[in-house]
Amino acid sequence: MTLLTCAAVRRRLAAFYDRELPIPELIAIESHVSGCAPCFDQLEGLREVGHVLRYAAAPGPADDWTGLQSGVISRMRAEAHEAWTERTRRMFDDMHLVWIGFASAVGAVICGMVALGAVQFHPPNATTHWPR
């Protein structure tokens, strides 16, 4: 284990606080700080500065409520616009697409019925032989 002087520890105290040092140095500084009151006080001072800076940088509650109503209304409209009932209603807004889809489906059913009818009503021909 490396024994460090107070001056060496204080030079590295900020890096120690940010955990930027290699593991052996972290251990050596931790053991020094746990037994040295002045270095421990310096480390506590760094911690307090960090807490104060985080508290000062934290945004406070917004006192400005302008734009809240319009934001809520626009979100409600966006949600209503994307609801499945609205999407279904929009699907039937342009009826010519519905009619095209319906006619295509009917045509496919008729083609299927004709093909099945041709296969079903075709009598088997026992005299037909395949060429060898």
Image (spheres, helix red, strand yellow):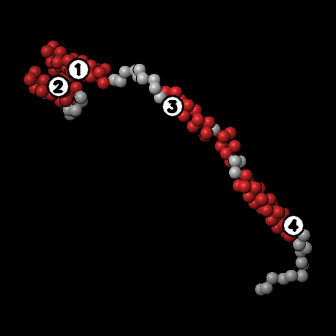
| Percent coordinates x, y for residue 30 in the rendering | 20, 23
How much space separates mark 4 and mark 1, taking CA atoms? 88 Å
Q: Nearer the viewer, residue 74 or 83?
A: 74
Residue shown at 61% from the left, 40% from the top: 82
Quarter of the image with the N terminus in it:
top left
* Neighbour tally class for label 2: few under 14, some 14-19, many 20 plus, Cα within 10 Å: many
Q: Give the amino acid at mark 3.
A: Gly
Q: Which of pointers 3 and 2 lies earlier in the amino acid sequence? A: 2
Is 45 on the left or on the right of 115, as rendered? left
- Is 81 drawn above or below residue 120 in the view shown? above
Judging by the rendered image, the residue that carries numbered circle 1 is 49
How much space separates mark 1 and mark 2, taking CA atoms? 13 Å
How much space separates mark 3 and mark 1, taking CA atoms? 38 Å
Q: Give the amino acid at mark 2.
A: Leu
Judging by the rendered image, the residue that carries numbered circle 4 is 117
| Percent coordinates x, y for residue 102 in the rendering | 77, 56
Is 72 on the left or on the right of 22, as rendered? right
Q: Nearer the viewer, residue 88 or 74?
A: 74
State yes or no: discs 3 and 2 in contact (Cβ < 8 Å).
Answer: no
| Percent coordinates x, y for residue 118 in the rendering | 86, 70
Judging by the rendered image, the residue that carries numbered circle 2 is 13
How much space separates mark 3 and mark 4, taking CA atoms? 61 Å
* Neighbour tally class for label 4: few under 14, some 14-19, many 20 plus, Cα within 10 Å: few
Kindly identify which numbered label has been placed on residue 71: 3
Give the total of numbered labels: 4
Q: Give the amino acid at mark 1.
A: Val
